[in-house]
Amino acid sequence: MDVDTIRAGLEAYSNGLELDRYEVDRGLRVESEARAIRQSYAELFSDDVRSVLDRAVEQADKRDLKEDAASLRLLRAGQIRLHVERQLSPIDAAISRHGRVVWVELTDGTRRPLRDMKLMLASAETSEQRTELENARVEAARVLSPLMSEKIGVEQGIAESLGHPNLVALQAAYSDLDLEAAEGLAEEILSETDALYHEVMGWTVRKRLGIALADARRCDIPYVLAGRYLGYAEAFTAQDMVQRTKGFLHKMGIELTASGQVTVEVERPAGPPRAYAAPVKVPTDVRLVLEIGDGQRDWLAFLQSLGRALYYGHVNQDLPFEQRKLGDGSIDLAYGALFRNLLLDPMWLSRTLGFERPKDYLIQAYLERLYDLRLCCGRVIYDLDLRRRATTVGMEETYVEVMRRAIGVEVPPELYLHDVRTPLHSVIQLRARLFEPQVTLHLLHYFDDHWWANPRTGLYLRQEWAKGSRFTVEELAHDMGASLSPKHLLKLFQKHL
């Protein structure tokens, strides 16, 4: 098997899984065909295939073909990542089956799916109500913990079978992700924002709950931050959402459908609202699914998915598969965050939604953003520690300690494996959160404060999106004259909090 055959096979395999996932999520198919797809492409994950890719990288290096070597490394890293996901798929499927529909039996006799937890906590006015919900989540975690603990052992076995002591070492060997640098950034953010976070969150918790931050629990935080959503709910109607979006994108010179490559599917949900981007085939078949209702949380989910779909739909289709899909996973998340954070721009809200945002809304929004960032940093530090140790023994205590340092509240130890279910995904999330402010700062510098209404912005973004994932966010930030640093984000927190 040669490199071109491997590349074509990996693309067909990835696209097949994406389509299957989309059809199951949309209810178009009752049973997933993922298992059959994985079996039919088994030969792509043999030792022989890895040897072919290793030799191709070595030969490109010897001939000093730097661009070819970089692309081949991307293909090899993608093949390793897909191999790990494939090996973990049986236990992930078992976890999914057990946790797919977990119902919370409430004292008022009603039943709600556990996936509604955050929304339920946000509207739970009493400590007793939040305790009831938290207990349900903890019980679900206890049921799933044996499977999740087994998964850590499976991960370790995969790493060792590929000649590495743990999953962190495997990741470091085959990708350009600097895990130690990410851990250092997480530590820096926690240190630099510690005083501000405890001051503002402490004040907000005391005002909302009448207790000190140290006496609060993680399940209290959605209720503490709920004012941002409940106090301004009428401003965030889903009516004409797509039409409004077309309007502000048009001002930027961007088509919502990316010249027909993004399909928008709108449906009012019977169940919990959600929005997501399904990159079935990048860039020619991207589905933007909007199963949404009214409310700011729906707008947040929609704008996040919109940014990701636009990125996928504008990737240069002439790039090899690895540069279109297998590269840095932080890039699409960062562009999702770029659009999601339009809800922090007063002028965009005024012109697009007719919402004149008061000052207290801004404070609540940035406080939630800081909380989310510190939560992510805690996950990075704990995730790396867990995967390095490759054991769950004693990790409950470590989890509680790390997360209390990060968010300052009590966290149930039973959630010690649930926060990091996808190995090292926390690192991808953190790097996306740090790259997005660099993109925003670049847009503000070149296209003014109303970059989202400047027709030159669309041309610039389309050119950036066309690059796909061939470069890391660190490299893209460097091209913007910056580094992947929390400095700009820290300035935003200082300004708005």
Image (cartoon, grey):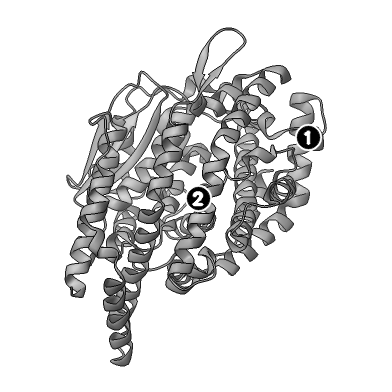
Residue 58: horizontal and vertical position, in percent? 32, 86
Residue 267, placed above or below residue 436: above
Residue 375 visible somewhere in the drawing: yes
The disc labelled 2 sits on which kind of residue? Answer: Lys
Mark yes or no: residue 254 visible: no
Whether residue 273 is situated above or below residue 480 in the rendered picture:
above
Pair 2/1: label in front = 2
Image vertical order of residue 105 relative to residue 88, above or below: above
Q: Residue at x 42, y 29 (%)?
A: 353
Question: Which mark identifies residue 3?
Answer: none
Q: Pointers 2 and 1 in contact (CB under 8 A)? A: no
Identify the residue shown where x is 60% and y is 7%. Answer: 108
Estimate the x, y position of residue 279 in percent, counting from the top left.
Answer: 28, 47
Q: Name the spot of residue 388 as percent of width and height, x first.
A: 60, 63
**Residue tagged 1:** 203
Disc 1 marks which amino acid?
Trp
Identify the secondary structure beneath mark 1: helix
Q: Is residue 484 left or right of residue 224?
A: left
Mark 2 crowd level (few <14, some 14–19, many ≥20, 10 Å Cα): many
